[in-house]
Amino acid sequence: MDDAERFGDVFRAHGGALDLTQLPPPMSIGLGEQLAFLRAAAPDVTSGFILNRAFNAVASLRDGREFLGIFVGAPLLLARFAYCFLSDPFTLTQIGDSSAESVRYDTIAALRQRKWPIEGPWEYLPRDTLRFHAAQQLCFCMNLVLFFHEIGHIELCHLEYLERETGVRDYVEMRASSASQEEALIVRTLEWDADHTALLSSLKAWKWFCRRYDYSAISALGVANAWWTAVQLLFWTMAFADPHDEGRPPTHPSPWTRIVNARMVAQSFGFVPELESQPVTGSADGVLDWLLRHRLYDVGMVTAAAGPKSVNAVVQELAEIGDCYRAIVDRLGRFQEAREKRTGRRIQRPPLGTPIA
Ligand SMILES: [Zn+2]
């Protein structure tokens, strides 16, 4: 059995491998480029897209081998958000001719009904060429963060940890079943851990891409602010895809906490002076304004996730995660040592105490 067959076999229950050659050229080319990047970023992991329209990803261990499947619904939804964001005449007006744009209400309405079909239609693309390219580039940056996050679950040994603790072999990003309060806190901590490495790795990769290729479409924003906008769009899209359910404990930190954490990580990275003048959250880049203006969050979600979450709530959540991280980090480290012996690769994990704001 070759790698492609093995991948399809491991993820058959989720929909199996997506055959890129069956897609129309713009989509097969775009997804093919994303896949090439994903495989280059994690050469030890057998990775690919799964034929499933939901926003999700799953990492698995099978006979000592690591597999990562990204549901194709994830890049599709990220693309919808990025392109609709730039096809609004009131967002990022410093890029291109925003007066040429008009809001694509049909696509927005479909998104509210949780529909983002694989076959288009494509009327939501920005009309202005520069804004179209800017949307493409923001979308690529969103995928960078998502991919590094999913690779992080594998390289930081979250799979081994959960397998030993709970007997579960797969790490599914958006879970259908509910977890106990204690399990949910551990998963939120692993999510924070994966975010930390994803934010640092994506910022490095993004700066490299912007230097090496033509990223002039986002030059009005600046490299760091474009990354910052993409990070906010990604975390709100993930919250949109997996809305907070009061009836079960959350398995991801709130989007506010993830965004505040992203700023802390970017500042620890350094060399991003453009971010210094930007508020942590708010309307400077228009992401949240845009989401609320188009009711991409309903009233319940606005209260739970998009409302003005207090600074104290974010500090409290990061402190809880910090306590949990201190309790499990040694075990995670031992799993990483074993993995390093096997693969020769090891990524740095956040230092102790980092989540304490
Ligand atoms: Zn995750």
Image: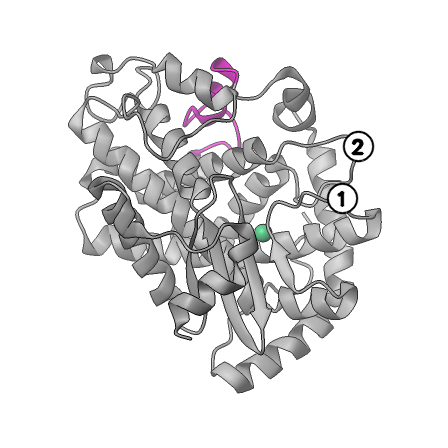
Measured from the top left, where is residue 6 in percent x and y?
46, 69
Please tell me how many numbered marks the rendered image carries. 2
Measured from the top left, where is residue 56 in percent x and y?
53, 45
- Horizontal relation, residue 313 to residue 36: left or right: right
Q: Quadrant of the N terminus?
A: bottom left
Measured from the top left, where is residue 174 in percent x and y?
61, 45
- Horizontal relation, residue 102 to residue 130: left or right: right
**Which residue is farthest right?**
181
Asked if residue 280 can be seen in this view, the reply is no
Nearer-the-camera pick, 178 or 87: 178
Residue topped by disc 1: 178
Q: Dot 2 lies on which element?
A: loop
**Amino acid type of the residue tagged 1 in the rendering:** Ser
Measured from the top left, where is residue 330 in percent x and y?
72, 73
Q: Measuring 83% from the left and 52% from the top, which residue is drawn there?
A: 182
Give yes or no for residue 283 being in the magenta stretch: yes
Which residues lie in the magenta part? Answer: 278-295
Q: Measuring 22% from the left and 40% from the top, which residue is drawn there?
A: 26
Which secondary structure type mostly characterizes the magenta part of the structure?
A: loop
Nearer-the-camera pick, 17 or 298: 17
Asked if residue 178 can be seen in this view, the reply is yes
> Against 84, is 28 above or below?
below
Q: Measuring 20% from the left and 21% from the top, which residue is drawn there?
A: 127
**Amino acid type of the residue tagged 2 in the rendering:** Gly
Q: Measuring 66% from the left and 53% from the top, which residue is drawn there?
A: 355
Tag shown at residue 247: 2
Circle 2 crowding by C-alpha within 10 Å: few under 14, some 14–19, many from 20? few
Nearer-the-camera pick, 143 or 167: 167
